[in-house]
Amino acid sequence: MTIEQRQQEIIEEFALFDDWMQKYEHIIELGKELPVISSEFKTDDNIIKGCQSRVWLHAEMLDSGVVHFTADSDAIITKGMIAMMIRVLSDQAPEDIASADLHFVNEIGLHQHLSPTRSNGLLSMIKQMKFYSLAFQAKNNG
């Protein structure tokens, strides 16, 4: 499934909810479903800078040429947000991640319903995931 198809899937899911309390509950559920990151990757090096809560993000390039992400957070909403980002961007080619227009964030209304600190945290997550993909791209081309 492409990044665009995954975004569309999330947009359709969020359209099923009438209000933001239900949408927040869905985000929390997505966080609960996030596969557990290996404890060896819950290090200071993997903490995303710019997030108010702690978010660990690990990226690895698989032999198939895609970037696989795992993550965790100590805050339930934040964990749901990183779960959505992983759902959209994980197991995709580095070039596709780097150039992805993550329009679903605005289309589901997430930016308008996050506090400024959470909004900054979400931007930091996106930046870090794109940074990893650019690093893998450079390594492949180098």
Image (cartoon, rainbow, N blue to C red):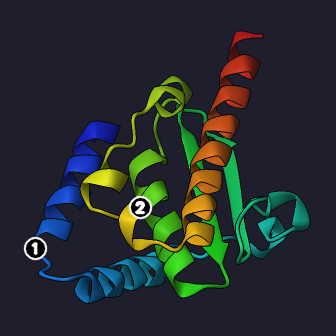
Report which quarter residue 16 is drawn in.
bottom left
Residue 51: x, y in percent? 70, 67
* Pick the front one: 111 or 37: 111
Total marks in image: 2
* Pick the front one: 102 or 132: 102
Residue 89 position (above or below residue 112): above
* Pick the front one: 98 or 24: 24
Q: Quadrant of the N terminus?
A: top left
- Helix, strand or loop at disc 2? helix
* Crowding at mark 2 (Cα within 10 Å: few <14, some 14-19, many 20+): some
Q: Quadrant of the C terminus?
A: top right
| Point 72% across, 67% down: residue | 56
Q: Which mark, by number, is residue 111?
A: 2
Whether residue 2 is visible here, answered yes or no, is no
The amino acid type, in three-letter code, at marker 2 is His
Residue 122 position (above or below residue 91): below
* Mark nearer the N terminus (1 vs 2): 1
Front tag of 1 and 2: 2
| Point 78% across, 59% down: residue | 49
Whether residue 44 is visible here, answered yes or no, is yes
The amino acid type, in three-letter code, at marker 1 is Leu
